[in-house]
Image (cartoon, rainbow, N blue to C red):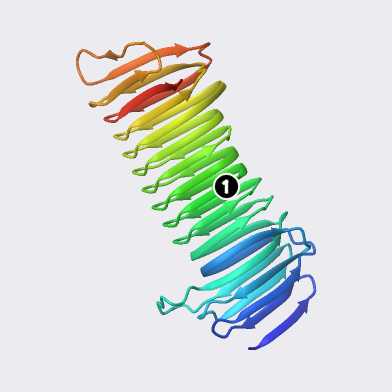
Amino acid sequence: MRFSTFFVPLCFIGTIFSSMAGDSINEHLSIDNATNVRIEILRGNITLSASDENQVSVKGELDDDAERFIFEREGSHINIKVLMPRLIAQDRNNRGSNLIINIPRQLKINFVGVSTNTQLDGFSRSVEIKTVSGNINANSLSSLVELTSVSGNIATDRLSGKIRLSTVSGDIKDKDSSGRLSLKAVSGNINIRSSAGEVSVNTVSGNVEVELIGVDEFFVSTVSGNYQGNLSLNENSSVKMSSISGNLNTVFNKPVQASFKLAVSAGGNLVNELTSDKIRKEKYGKNSKLKFSTGNGNGSVKATTLSGQIKVSGNH
């Protein structure tokens, strides 16, 4: 192994070494005035652990095909990279890099991977994780959180602040979040249990299941996926639901203080188990509408679908 440590005034300080297959590493770097950590690891299993120390440490085993490992401080950034050859043989026995990275919890994190599974816990600043086929598991993050995977699954627990979770074909499962929550999927399923005040959910064919406690604003949109919700509304809350052919089924925890406007067309169906108000069907065509209020009616609930079903009911 060739190893060098170097110092360049006002530029960077760190470690770069050429890698032998499956090298073990145990490196440390003081953060000094750094505010951001940038990480690029193509594949493997990576754990990002929050610490109260004044340094970043990397420990574990590098990818068998790794060419170089870069660990440097460059201005306000700390860079961690595992450099790979442009062409990589597909070896099922090679699981990539297996690293534990300890980072002071107040630093901002930007992570980029491809088939990299990422687990992180306990950070209090901006966190951005992007991977293609890797899974993301995140716990106890706050402030600004953005987690993205194309085909990997995303599982989160106790996130707070401004939260954005998105995937294409993977599933999203969020538990006990708070703040502002935005979730997007195409064919993946979404499952939420949250006390976030603002929640937005978008999917195409994936199914959505939510349990929201004390929500102020809730928006859900799906094309052919089905939605099942259990909602506890705050005073003056706003709920908007829409689908093309997917079903929209919501159970409201009482007391419900809202005005309802529900509409279906092109053969859709309306079911009202919340009140005794009757559905109004147009004489010509397949449209149906339902308007009513519960309690003081200060909140707003709107739902539309073309050929799906809208069902509202109460949790007695």
User: In this figure, which residue is indicated by the disc labeled 1?
Assistant: 157
Task: Report the number of discs.
Answer: 1
For the point 31% across and 14% down, which residue is it? Answer: 279
Relative placement, left or right, of 15 versus 246 is right
Location of the N terminus by quadrant is bottom right
Is disc 1 surrounded by few (<14), some (14 to 19) or many (20+) residues within 10 Å? some
Relative placement, left or right, of 131 versus 189 is right
For the point 56% across and 71% down, which residue is it? Answer: 98
Relative placement, left or right, of 266 versus 182 is left
Give the image quarter of residue 313. top left
For the point 70% across and 72% down, which residue is it? Answer: 72
Image coordinates of residue 260 in percent, x first then y, are 43, 17
Image coordinates of residue 306 in percent, x first then y, are 29, 29
Image coordinates of residue 123 in percent, x first then y, are 67, 53
**61 above or below 255?**
below
Give the image quarter of residue 73. bottom right
Give the image quarter of residue 26. bottom right
Kind of residue sitting beneath label 1:
Asp
**65 above or below 188?**
below
For the point 68% across and 50% down, which residue is it? Answer: 125
**223 above or below 101?**
above
Q: What element carries label 1?
A: strand
Relative placement, left or right, of 280 versus 182 is left
